Image: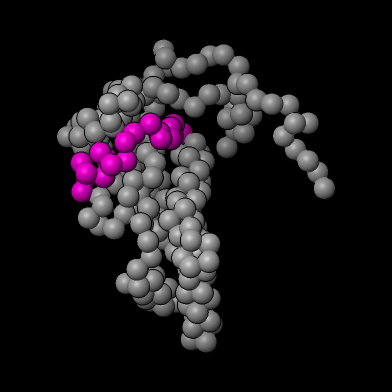
Amino acid sequence: MDLDKLMSKHLSRYFDGSKTIPDETLQQLLRFLRSAPTSTNIQPNHFYVVSSQEGKERLAANLGERFQDNAEKILNASHTIILTTRADVPEHHLEAVFAKERADGRFADEAKQERWESMTRDFVSLRKYSYKDTYHWMEKQTYMVMGLTMMAAAELGVEAMPLEGFDPISVDKAFNIRATGYTTTVLLALGYPDEAKQYKTPVSRFEPERLFTFA
C-alpha cells in the first residue's frame, strides 16, 4: 500500500458508472469484511451488498429529501454496502455466536470456551444495565469494521466512500431491515473514480503539533 499516495489524495466523491469491480476483487473484499474483528466477537452486523440496477435505484430513491445529492454517487458506484447494526443483543444472537465459535474450535478446550462465554455475557450485561449504551457500543464496532474495509479496498485498488447523508428510517423501510432486528448505520460506496470530477486541491489538515501529544 502506498501510504504517501493515500495521504495526499481526497476521498473520491464521484464514481465512473461505466466501471464495475471484478467479482474476484469483490469476493476478496467481502471475505475481509467478514473477518473484521468486533469487541468480544459480538458480530453485530449484517451487510446488504447493492449492485443491481434495481437495488441502486431503490437505495438512491430512499436516501431522504435532504440527501438527494448523494443519489448520483449511489447510482454510479459499482457497489454500495449498507452496513447495519443489531438494535440489541437477544439471547438467540449470543447463542449463535457461541455455537459458531464452538463449531470452529476457537478455543482449545471446553473450560476456556465456557470462561469466554461467561465473560462475554457479563460484558453484554454491563453495556445493557450499567452503561446503558448497548446499541452505541455495537455501532462503534460497525464503524471500526467500515474503516478496516476502506483500507482493504485501497489495497485492492478500489475507491471507498462512506456516506452518512441518508435517512435511516427510509433506507430501513426500503430494504425491510428493521424486521430482521437490525438498523442502517452507514453506507459504503465502492467503485472507480470519475477522474474528471476528482478534487485536485491539496489535502488540508492541522499541523502535527496540534494533533499529537506524546506521553
Residue occupying image coordinates x 37% and y 61% = 88
Residue 159 pos. (x, y %): 44, 31
In the rendered structure, does residue 98 fall within the stretch colored magenta? no
Task: Give the quarter of the image for residue 188.
Answer: top left
Q: Quadrant where the N terminus lies?
A: top right
> Compared with residue 138, is residue 81 higher up or lower down, i.e. above or below?
above
- Side (left or right) of 210 relative to 152: right
> Compared with residue 177, is residue 58 higher up or lower down, i.e. above or below?
above
- Side (left or right) of 32 relative to 168: right
Q: How is the image coloured?
A: one colour
Task: Give the quarter of the image for residue 45.
Answer: bottom left
Residue occupying image coordinates x 39% and y 22% = 14
Task: Report if residue 74 is visible in the image.
Answer: yes
As drawn, the residue found furthest toward the right would be 215
Task: Report if residue 152 is visible in the image.
Answer: no
Residue 6 pos. (x, y %): 58, 30
Residue 67 pos. (x, y %): 33, 26
Q: Which residues are magenta?
A: 156-176
In the rendered structure, does residue 157 fall within the stretch colored magenta? yes
What is the count of numbered marks?
Answer: 0
Residue occupying image coordinates x 39% and y 27% = 192
Residue 78 pos. (x, y %): 31, 32
